[in-house]
Amino acid sequence: AKANVIAPKTANHAIYVQRVSVHVASGLAGVTWSLEDSSARPLSGAVSVATSPTHVDYDFGPAGVPLTTGADLTFVPSATGVQGTVTWDAYRRQVGTVVA
């Protein structure tokens, strides 16, 4: 099941992802992990987590890549049973007008 891992502060904020690291400790054949925003826009391609150890890094530079404004960063495993971690460096920035 999908899991939201970072939420924007408001609908007028965007999350900028700078780096993502995937570490698989115990793999499972045919399983993939990916990251997308909550509007289903992919951030990373599907990473095969069939073998372990596996390590994959995505580096989007110091400015990062923006998710859709107001969208969460979402972890999407194709199945359960894999052990590992996904870490990221990101920041939130206001991109729209906030009305008081």
Image (cartoon, rainbow, N blue to C red):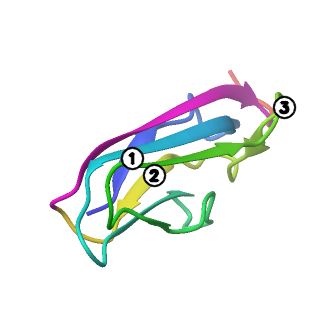
- Element on which disc 1 rests: strand
Residue 38: give x, y in percent of width and height: 51, 58
Q: Are marks 3 and 1 in contact (CB under 8 Å)?
A: no
Identify which amino acid the numbered label 3 is placed on: Ala
Q: Are marks 1 and 2 in contact (CB under 8 Å)?
A: yes
User: Magenta span covers which residues?
Assistant: 81-95
Identify which amino acid the numbered label 2 is placed on: Thr
Residue at 25% of width from left, 63% of height from top? 1
Q: Classify 10 Å Cα crowding around label 3: few (below 14), some (14-19), many (20 and above).
A: few
Left or right, 54 with respect to 11, comes to: left
Residue at 54% of width from left, 68% of height from top? 40
- Alpha carbon of mark 2 to alpha carbon of mark 3: how far? 20 Å
Which of the pair 52/22 is nearer the observer? 52
- Element on which disc 3 rests: loop
Residue 79: give x, y in percent of width and height: 23, 69
- Alpha carbon of mark 1 to alpha carbon of mark 2: how far? 4 Å
